[in-house]
């Protein structure tokens, strides 16, 4: 929609998100440094310790490693499923709004024009108001106005054309379900306590690996240790990012709804030449 502001680049609570990322990195770095320091102190105090000491340390670290890996795998799966559900809901909602407009062609006037105009305004209001406000998981009243308008027209249509009424109600119900799913998936799926438990588990694992480095170590041991620390930290940041499907670095954009708004906006201009939309370009009602 030419000249209008796109809201794909909003960031949900950017200060809090940056702080969470920074704290995660600092914890992992501190665990790595603490493990290396502890390893250095252990080497100084027991330069000629028993041969089986390394094996005993490895035995202690192994269960911790298993716990950390299983926990990360589980959380990634949960976050990825939430991200996928959010993307599917966005596509479904945009498709149902387009379907709602098309099915309204079978309705008589004046309900036809009113419902088609409401569909265009709904799409515009979703992008202008609800998309940037999805961090709270709440509906934007500017978009809900048009949901109410749909139902108002359905009541008038129920006495005129039962077949069109049933098709429109079905399309609107599916739109509503998709909207609710999108809003519910906008908020983080991973509980805060689970995320920080995972951070502590991975940090303890990295610290344990660093502490358990063999006495006769070479550059390869340090390379593998830092690679492992980087992968664990990257996994945490990836989980934190995809758990915010509409505000992370790999966020889901409003492209699907924008395309729908453009398409049905053009259709409205062609179907009702000279007739204005019942809203301004952002989807806010222009009349009471």
Image: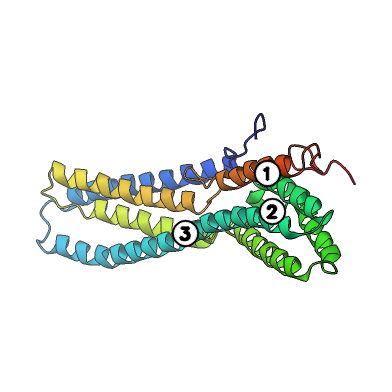
Question: Judging from the image, what secondary structure is the residue with disc 1 in?
Answer: helix
Q: Which callout, 3 or 1, points at the residue further toward the start of the chain?
A: 3
Q: Please say whether residue 187 is visible from this viewpoint.
A: no
Mark closer to the observer (2, 3) = 2
Q: How is the image coloured?
A: rainbow
Q: Which residue position holds label 3?
A: 79
Query: Residue 207 location in percent, x, y?
Result: 31, 53
Q: Locate residue 63 relative to residue 136 in the image: left or right.
A: left
For this orientation, the residue located farthest to the top is 3
State the residue in front, 223 or 100.
100
Mark closer to the observer (3, 1) = 1
Query: Residue 186 location in percent, x, y?
Result: 59, 54
Tell whether label 3 touches label 2 (CB within 8 Å).
Answer: no
Query: Residue 2 location in percent, x, y?
Result: 65, 31
Q: Residue at x 46, y 63 (%)?
A: 78
Q: Which residue position holds label 2?
A: 101
Tell whether label 2 touches label 1 (CB within 8 Å).
Answer: yes
Q: Locate residue 13 relative to residue 34 in the image: left or right.
A: right
Where residue 124 is drawn, which disc sits there? Answer: none
**Disc 1 versus disc 2: distance between alpha carbons?**
9 Å
Within-10-Å neighbours for mark 3: few <14, some 14–19, many 20+ = many
Q: Is residue 190 above or below residue 130?
A: below
State the residue in front, 190 or 53.
190
Q: Is residue 67 above or below residue 19?
A: below
Where residue 267 is drawn, which disc sits there? Answer: 1
**Disc 3 versus disc 1: distance between alpha carbons?**
38 Å
Quadrant where the N terminus is found in the figure: top right
Q: Locate residue 52 relative to residue 20 in the image: left or right.
A: left
């Amino acid at each position: 929609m030419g000249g209008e502001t796109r809201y794909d680049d909003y960031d949900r609570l950017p200060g809090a998100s940056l702080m969470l990322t920074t704290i995660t990195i600092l914890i992992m770095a501190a665990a790595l440094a603490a493990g290396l320091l502890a390893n250095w102190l252990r080497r100084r105090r027991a330069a000629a310790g028993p041969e089986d000491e390394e094996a005993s340390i490895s035995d202690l670290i192994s269960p911790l490693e298993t716990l950390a890996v299983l926990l990360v795998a589980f959380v990634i799966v949960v976050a990825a499923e939430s991200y996928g559900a959010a993307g599917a809901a966005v596509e479904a909602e945009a498709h149902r709004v387009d379907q709602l407009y098309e099915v309204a062609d079978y309705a008589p006037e004046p309900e036809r024009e009113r419902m088609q105009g409401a569909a265009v305004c709904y799409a515009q209001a979703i992008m202008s108001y609800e998309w940037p406000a999805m961090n709270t998981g709440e509906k934007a009243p500017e978009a809900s106005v048009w949901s109410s308008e749909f139902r108002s027209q359905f009541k008038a249509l129920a006495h005129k054309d039962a077949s069109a009424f049933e098709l429109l109600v079905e399309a609107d119900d599916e739109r509503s379900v998709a909207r609710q799913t999108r809003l519910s998936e906008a908020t983080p799926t991973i509980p805060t306590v689970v995320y920080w438990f995972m951070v502590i588990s991975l940090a303890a694992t990295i610290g344990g690996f660093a502490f358990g480095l063999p006495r006769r170590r070479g550059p390869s041991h340090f390379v593998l240790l830092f690679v492992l620390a980087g992968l664990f930290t990257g996994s945490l940041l990836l989980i934190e990012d995809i758990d915010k499907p509409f505000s992370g670095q790999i966020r889901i954009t409003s492209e699907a709804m924008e395309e729908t708004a453009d398409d049905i906006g053009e259709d409205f201009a062609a179907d009702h030449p000279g007739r204005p939309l019942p809203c301004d370009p952002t989807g806010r009602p222009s009349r009471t």
